Amino acid sequence: MTAHLEADQVGFAYGRRAVLDAVSFAVAPGELVGVIGPNGAGKTTLVRLLAGVLAPSTGTVRLGGRPLRSYRRRDVARRLAVVPQDAHVQFPFTALEIVLMGRAAHLPRLGFPRARDLAVARAAMERLEVGHLEERPLDHVSGGERQRVLLSRALAQEPDVLLLDEPTTHLDLRHQAGIHEVLRDLVQTRGTAIVSVLHDLNLAAMYCDRLVLLADGRVARMGPPSEVLTADALGSAYRTSVYVGPNAATGSLVVLPRRPAR
Ligand SMILES: Nc1ncnc2c1ncn2[C@@H]1O[C@H](COP(=O)(O)OP(=O)(O)OP(=O)(O)O)[C@@H](O)[C@H]1O
Ligand SMILES: [Mg+2]
């Protein structure tokens, strides 16, 4: 199995505050790996390290077998796309302009988008049902629409590796499932390697090939959903009582919070 993206014993501290400790995992082409864990566990920090936005204090992140830091920024952007948890867009670009930015790394330097770039951008927007928002400034759309526009930008980048930080936070039920269907399709038809941070453990159970459970900056458990989503592992990572049972409709698992015993 050739790993597209790999964290090897990665540690990180914000100043003196240690946040991640010896985190190792890899995502292969054609695989969707979910990162789960409580608030503050270090998931977003891990995504930033995998994207090369932050540099590890210890250990190495590798893309296609080579240390990420040995790549030029532009070469990373050709291969890896990120949908961050809080994407700030400073200027009132339209949705289409934002999505076209995903094509930047594929253009000649200072080049203008060509017909193919426009077609790729529009196809990505259609796929996420935001085609009708093309002309709309991004600060004039709803939270869920904005999230789908930002995901369109990542798809327009046509990356080998896609990193998503809570891509469904603002989405309604239909679009939560819809986005995950799009992700599964990318994994299956293009062999994209996807790492997605998820709070919804039911979506994680349904759509991910493997899960990494982070707790206090360490990998508490890693493996197929059936091995990671256990009442014990989740109970101690999230420090609360959970119910894990069969999902009669899909054959995957359901995870529900449980009221503490009185
Ligand atoms: N810029 C920063 N400077 C200092 N500490 C930070 C910074 N960003 C995050 N932290 C701390 O690092 C830890 C991990 O944060 P991170 O954002 O990675 O968590 P997370 O797992 O993504 O949480 P959430 O589920 O709430 O998004 C937290 O304790 C957080 O307070
Ligand atoms: Mg986060």
Image (cartoon, grey):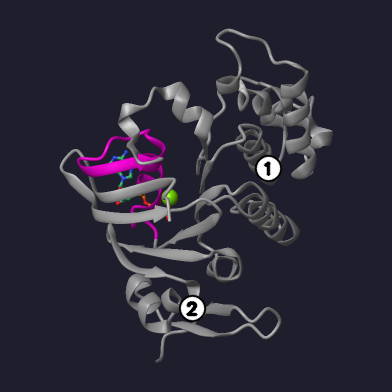
**Residue marked by disc 1:** 148
Q: Residue at (41%, 91%) from the top-left corner?
A: 261
Q: Is residue 44 magenta?
A: yes
Q: Quadrant of residue 149?
A: top right
Query: Which amino acid is tagged 2?
Result: Ser
Residue at the far top in the pictured view: 110
Residue found 62% across the figure and 35% down from its top = 158
To which quarter of the image does residue 103 belong? top right
Q: Is residue 19 left or right of residue 259?
A: left
Q: Residue at x 50, y 61 (%)?
A: 199
Determine the residue positioned at 65% across, 57% down.
184
Kindly give the residue lying farthest to the left in the view shown.
16
Query: Looking at the rendering, in which quadrant would you find the C terminus?
Result: bottom left
Picture layout, residue 51 above or below residue 260: above
Task: Name the residue that disc number 2 marks.
Answer: 226
Say whether residue 23 is left or right of residue 150: left
Q: Secondary structure at mark 1?
A: helix
Question: x%, y% of residue 203?
Answer: 59, 66
Q: Which residues are magenta?
A: 39-63
The x, y position of residue 14, in whole percent, is 23, 40
Dot 1 amino acid type: Arg
Residue closer to the observer: 35 or 224: 224
Residue nearest the viewer, comparing 31 with 202? 31
Cα distance between the residues tagged 2 and 1? 29 Å
Q: Classify the position of the N terminus by image quarter.
A: bottom left
Place of residue 2 in the rendered image (x, y in percent of width and height, measured from the top left): 42, 51
Front in this rendered view, residue 80 or 261? 80
